[in-house]
Amino acid sequence: MFRLNRQRPARKALRSGVLTAMSFVLLPFLIAPAQAMQIQKVVSPKGIEAWLVEEHTLPLIAMQLGFDGGSAQDPAGKDGETVRRIRDEIEARVRALVAELADDQPS
């Protein structure tokens, strides 16, 4: 004869209470402790400085570059020189592109 295993309500409550208590006791041991990031300063042989942060749990490489540009690169006393050079370069390339496209068109 097949009998269903019926537990008493008090025993069932005790078992769920013990399991809940055990989970609260064991949970802190299962969670990895938080750690501060270690930032390393790396300098190349030519003097380029970089910060290196290694995190081996994530397979990710991220890079961010920053450098002086625009008017910061203008020679002393020649403000706006970089903008003029860039504008002239763009105009020359656009003219060359238009001329090339005009040559490709049938007459």
Image (cartoon, rainbow, N blue to C red):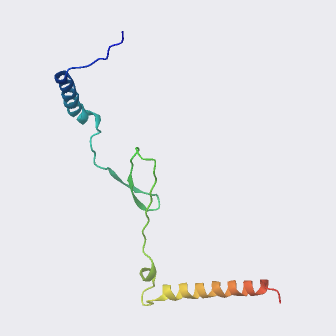
Query: Does residue 64 sit above or below 5 in this rendering?
Result: below
The residue shown at (36%, 12%) is: 2
The residue shown at (46%, 47%) is: 59
Q: Quadrant of residue 100?
A: bottom right
Residue nearest the viewer, comparing 105 with 87:
105
Q: Residue furthest front?
A: 1
Q: Does residue 106 appear to the left or right of 100 in the view shown?
A: right
Q: How many marks?
A: 0
Query: Does residue 70 sit above or below 28 in this rendering?
Result: below
Q: Does residue 17 appear to the left or right of 102 in the view shown?
A: left
Q: Does residue 21 appear to the left or right of 84 in the view shown?
A: left
Residue nearest the viewer, comparing 69 with 17:
17
Where is residue 34 drawn, in percent x and y? 27, 44
The residue shown at (31%, 17%) is: 4
Where is residue 87 drawn, in percent x and y? 55, 87
Query: Does residue 66 sit above or below 105 in this rendering?
Result: above
Q: Does residue 69 appear to the left or right of 13 in the view shown?
A: right
The residue shown at (63%, 87%) is: 92
Q: Residue furthest top?
A: 1
Q: Quadrant of residue 64?
A: bottom left
Where is residue 32 drawn, in percent x and y? 29, 39
Where is residue 65 drawn, in percent x and y? 44, 65
Residue nearest the viewer, comparing 34 with 82:
34
Q: Quadrant of residue 1?
A: top left
**The C terminus sits in image quarter:** bottom right
